[in-house]
Image (tube, rainbow, N blue to C red):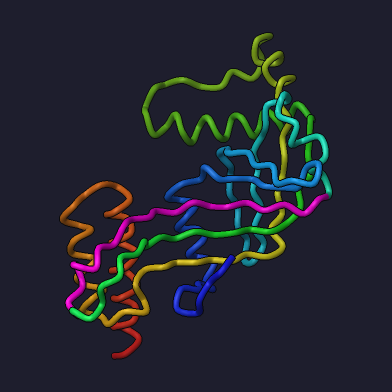
Amino acid sequence: MYTPRHFAEHDLAALDELIAHDAFVTLVHQQDGAPFATHLPVLYRRDGVRVELRGHWSKANPQWRDIGGQSALIIVHGPHAYVSPTWYVDSDQRVPTWNYATAHLYGRVETTDDPAELEAIVTALSDIYEAKHDSGWRFERTTPDTRRELRGIVGFRFFAERIELKFKLSQNHPVANQRGVIDHLEQHGGDDRRAVAAMMRTRLNEEARDET
């Protein structure tokens, strides 16, 4: 991933932040000489520098058949927002751009069809997302329908071997320009705009603390 030094992040807490914002990722590998991508939710675990993701495919998805042991890429999609040059205090800055945060994780994949592991993955995913909607639905592990459904999926574990974090948040601009962008993003609303503004404000505050 092209990452100018202004936008490179090295603290893995930034990856925690991205996954907390959106754990629906893109898993890419090479299949028959061409890139093949699947979009799917994942479970995230980090222990120091060790990062592991878990999830599952439909068994009808061919990606699982030959991905085991291959190098793979997982793209974590953070918030993003258009930035108008009219928001800058510096009148010489007249180029529109896009602010965003993303992570590229490179590593290897292990597949599994172990029923206990599949149950654990599906249960954890459903618990996370059903809790956000307070629906009361729970994954029933022991019903015949559940066992049949589990036979239709393949699970995976992804072990990150290299992580690239890019937070393009106007860091190459004067502080006044950054504050102008934050103000406009907050005023225009929208979840992604507000999330980008929050990331920008957090980093400005951290820089101010470092200078005192």
Left or right position of 63 against 47: right
Question: Image height check: is 158 above or below 87?
Answer: above
Left or right position of 30 against 95: right
Picture quadrant of residue 186: bottom left
Q: Which residue occupies 47% across, 55% down? A: 18
Left or right position of 106 against 164: right
Q: Position of residue 22 (x, y in %)?
A: 46, 47
Quadrant where the image shows the N terminus: bottom right
* Residue 83 drawn in magenta: yes
Quadrant where the image shows the C terminus: bottom left
Residue at the limit of the structure toward the bottom, as seen here: 212
Q: Position of residue 108 (x, y in %)?
A: 76, 53
Residue at the limit of the structure toward the top, as seen here: 144
Q: Position of residue 81 (x, y in %)?
A: 33, 56
Q: Nearer the viewer, residue 28 or 112?
A: 28
Question: Image height check: is 53 above or below 168?
Answer: above
Q: Main secondary structure of the magenta part?
A: strand
- Start-end of magenta stretch: 70-90
Left or right position of 163 against 88: right
Q: Which residue occupies 74% across, 36% down? A: 63
Q: How many marks?
A: 0
Q: Which residue occupies 72% across, 24% down? A: 60
Picture quadrant of residue 160: bottom right
Q: Position of residue 139 (x, y in %)?
A: 56, 22
Q: Which residue occupies 58% across, 43% down? A: 43
* Residue 169 drawn in magenta: no
Q: Nearer the viewer, residue 69 or 83?
A: 83
Question: Image height check: is 209 above or below 100?
Answer: below
